[in-house]
Image (tube, rainbow, N blue to C red):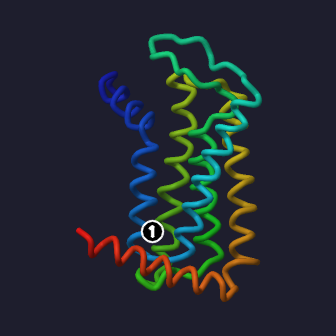
Amino acid sequence: MSNFLWNVWLSFLDRTDFTVAGITGASVFYTRSAAAAYYTAGAIFCSLSVKVIKRLVKQPRPPPTARKLKKTYGMPSTHSAAISYLATYIVLASMFLPVHPSFPPSINIRLLAPVVALPWAVAVVMSRLWLGHHTVPQVLAGASYGVALASVWFSIWKNVLSPSETVRGFEKEVVKMVEHYLTMS
């Protein structure tokens, strides 16, 4: 791959938080489901809790090379945690939850999301090293945190919240809020 294309690819991966936020937001609006809102809440919790951990651990990032110096701490990597949370949750949902009614009931739908999410997650985690933003232990800690949180978060949804009447009521409220927002424009 040429140096120019490599730099474009790394730049995209460095700003993947905007892409992920857009796709996640679109999934909530498209599906209008409590499950998508819950998944999104978990992603936000993952990012915010990692930022708290960073302030407690206070481990510096690697010394800057050609990149701009980041002003936050490095341990654990927020990007690695968030993308690992998202990829893990997507894999678990694809394996254990029914396909949302707005999608065709096909094995291809079940496979598409993990086939996209897993390589993307690996690329984002690796980009944190390639860009010099984090050390190996920092990305491993972030990725491990994301996988563990997604596993617990998904288990709570599948075993506690999903079957409850409270969630069904919450889902109706999510649908109302999304529809209200869409009719405002």
Q: Residue at x 42, y 81 (%)?
A: 176
Quarter of the image where the N terminus is located: top left
Where residue 35 sits, quadrant-wise, is bottom right
In the displayed structure, does residue 15 sit left or right of residue 169?
left
- Against 9, is 117 above or below? below
Q: Amino acid at mark 1?
A: Val
> What count of labels does the image hold?
1
Q: Residue at x 46, y 59 (%)?
A: 24
In the image, residue 84 lies at what x, y percent? 62, 49
**Residue at mark 1:** 28
In the image, residue 141 lies at what x, y percent? 73, 37
Q: Residue at x 57, y 38 (%)?
A: 125
Task: Assess disc 1: are there few (<14), some (14-19) or many (≥20) residues with their C-alpha within 10 Å of its C-alpha.
Answer: many
Q: Nearer the viewer, residue 59 or 114?
A: 59
In the displayed structure, does residue 156 sit left or right of residue 88?
right
- Against 159, is 112 above or below? above
Quarter of the image where the C terminus is located: bottom left
In the displayed structure, does residue 100 sit left or right of residue 129?
left
**Secondary structure type for disc 1:** helix
Q: Residue furthest left?
A: 185
In the image, residue 3 lies at what x, y percent? 34, 22
Q: Residue at x 61, y 70 (%)?
A: 93
- Against 178, is 13 above or below? above
In the image, residue 136 lies at what x, y percent? 68, 27
Q: Nearer the viewer, residue 128 or 72?
A: 72
Where residue 160 sits, quadrant-wise, is bottom right
Q: Residue furthest bottom?
A: 165
